[in-house]
Image (cartoon, rainbow, N blue to C red):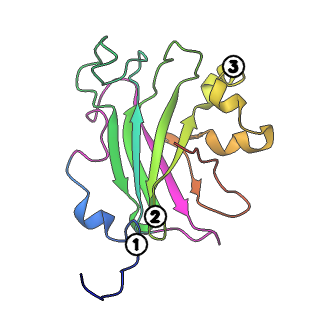
Amino acid sequence: MSNLPTTPSQTVGPYLHIGLTWDDGPYAVPLGTPGAAWLRGRVFDGVGEPIDDAMVEIWQADANGHIAHPDDGRGVAEHFRGFARSDTLAGEFAVYTVVPGPLGDGQAPHIDVSVFARGLLHRVVTRVYFPEHADQHATDPVLAAVPPERRGTLIAANGPDGYVFDVYLQGAHETVFFDV
């Protein structure tokens, strides 16, 4: 046994955009897929500065509410991966996907989002809900568990070519994160 000191824990990053990107990374569906749109946003630190070396991953159901997983068994739309990943060069991310359909279990259509960034020992996990499904937000069991004054941090805004969803890791506008 050595008398060497232990090394500190490794935090996530900061080189995510070098080693964890690939050609299909930001595409949950191919360009031109009917009904597809961009989900764009920025990731901010605790003082409101954009983080230029984070990574955003999405997992979601297809437009019919089917999950790309063997346990679902219903199959998914052609060319739908259910997963996409974007780095945040200049603090901005963009993923190309479809708005998911309802899962059939009372949850409103949503996208699960993981954010990896320097200074984090583990990813943070949140959700993106869509403004056109506002009538379903009140009955979503996860969204209903969030204090009303914080729910807005989970709802995307309409954007020029899809949706806008900014993530605040800390501070006055901190996004709601879930302990998963």
Depth check, front residue: 62 or 15: 15
Residue that carries the numbered disc 1 in the rendered image = 9
Whichever of callouts 1 and 3 sits on the residue coming sooner in the sequence is: 1
Most common secondary structure along the magenta stretch: loop
Q: Residue at x 77, y 39 (%)?
A: 147
Residue under the point 40% across and 72% down: 9
Is 97 covered by the magenta stretch? no
Q: Amino acid at mark 3?
A: Thr
Q: Of all residues shown, which one is farthest toward the right?
A: 149
Mark 1 Cα-neighbour bin, 10 Å: few <14, some 14–19, many ≥20: few
Q: Compare marks 2 and 3 and give the one earlier in the sequence.
A: 2
Residue 72: x %, y % from top left: 34, 16
Q: Can the viewer see residue 135 in this picture?
A: yes
- Mark 2 vs 1: CB contact within 8 A: yes
Q: Position of residue 145 (x, y in %)?
A: 71, 33
In which quadrant of the rendered view does residue 44 lie?
A: bottom right
Looking at the image, residue 71 sits to the left or right of residue 167; the answer is left
Q: Name the residue type under label 2.
A: Leu
Q: Tell me whether the residue at label 2 lies in contact with that at label 3, contact meaning CB atoms closer than 8 angstroms.
A: no
Q: Earlier in the sequence, mark 2 or mark 1?
A: 1
Residue 121 is marked as: 2
* Stretch in magenta: 24-51
The residue lying toward the viewer, choosing from 158 and 17, is 17
> For the residue carrying disc 3, how many other residues have a C-alpha within 10 Å: few (<14), some (14-19), or many (20+)?
few
Could you tell me which residue is drawn at 47 percent across and 19 percent down? 101
Q: CA distance from mark 2 to mark 1?
A: 8 Å
For the view shown, which residue lies furthest in the left direction?
23
Q: Is residue 21 above or below residue 177?
A: below
